[in-house]
Image: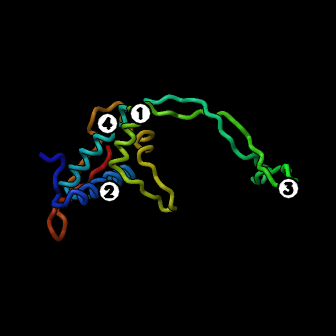
């Protein structure tokens, strides 16, 4: 028995449609699609949100030494002139070493992040920057639903589509 509805498509096309719709749902919060597709995307989205909720706070922090170039008031890098053993002069950028706290995922959270990345694409904003849907799920969406047990999405029927009379719906995050 198959896991998902076939939607009249081959496997690669079906997976691409479901990934695109799932990504669009997490980016915009609501999508308009056919009823059959919406029901499949609803199942996928609710599973991904549930996984993100379970693993939302499953990480540790550790201190890491980082090196950054020193800059002046104008934002230019500070350089120093050095002389090599054979007498050549060259410029060296002054560096500043500092300790920063970095978040380290536990193995189960890392697995959850990779599972979510398998079901979403990395869309771009209008200005060309990548949007990380996985981070958005863990940092924005999961905390919003942490006290709720399921039912993270809602389907509204909006009537038949003109042309082929397919039942159209709006799928949105509650």
Of label 3 and label 1, which has the lower sequence position?
1
Q: Is residue 27 visible?
A: yes
| Residue 94 placement, left or right of 139 | right
* Contact between labelled residues 1 and 3, with CB atoms less than 8 Å apart: no
* Contact between labelled residues 4 and 2, with CB atoms less than 8 Å apart: no
Of label 3 and label 4, which has the lower sequence position?
4
Tell me the SS state at disc 3: loop
Residue sitting at x 78%, y 54%:
74
Q: Residue furthest bottom?
A: 163
Instruction: Say the numbered circle drawn on residue 88.
Output: 3
Residue sitting at x 20%, y 49%:
39
Of label 2 and label 1, which has the lower sequence position?
2
Residue sitting at x 68%, y 41%:
67
| Residue 157 placement, left or right of 88 | left
Of label 2 and label 3, which has the lower sequence position?
2
Residue holding disc 2: 20
* Disc 2/disc 4 C-alpha distance (Å): 19 Å
Instruction: Say the numbered circle drawn on residue 56.
Output: 1
Tell me the SS state at disc 2: helix
Q: Nearer the viewer, mark 3 or mark 4?
A: 3
Please state which of residues 66 and 76 is positioned toward the viewer in this rendering.
66
Q: Is residue 82 visible?
A: no
For the N terminus, give its image quadrant: top left
Residue holding disc 4: 50
* Contact between labelled residues 4 and 3, with CB atoms less than 8 Å apart: no
């Amino acid at each position: 028995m198959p896991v998902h509805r076939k939607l009249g498509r081959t496997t690669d096309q079906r997976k691409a449609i479901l990934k695109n719709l799932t990504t669009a749902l997490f980016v915009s919060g609501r999508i308009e699609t056919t009823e059959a597709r919406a029901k499949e995307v609803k199942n996928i989205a609710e599973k991904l949100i549930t996984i993100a909720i379970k693993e939302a706070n499953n990480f540790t922090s550790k201190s890491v030494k980082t090196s950054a170039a020193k800059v002046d008031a104008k934002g230019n890098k500070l350089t120093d002139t050095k002389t090599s053993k054979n007498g050549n002069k060259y410029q060296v950028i002054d560096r500043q070493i500092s300790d920063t706290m970095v978040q380290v995922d536990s193995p189960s959270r890392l697995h959850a992040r990779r599972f979510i990345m398998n079901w979403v694409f990395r869309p771009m904003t209008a200005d060309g920057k990548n949007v990380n849907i996985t981070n958005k799920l863990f940092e924005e969406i999961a905390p919003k639903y942490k006290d709720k047990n399921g039912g993270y999405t809602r389907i509204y029927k909006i009537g038949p589509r003109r042309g082929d009379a397919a039942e159209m719906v709006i799928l949105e995050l509650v």
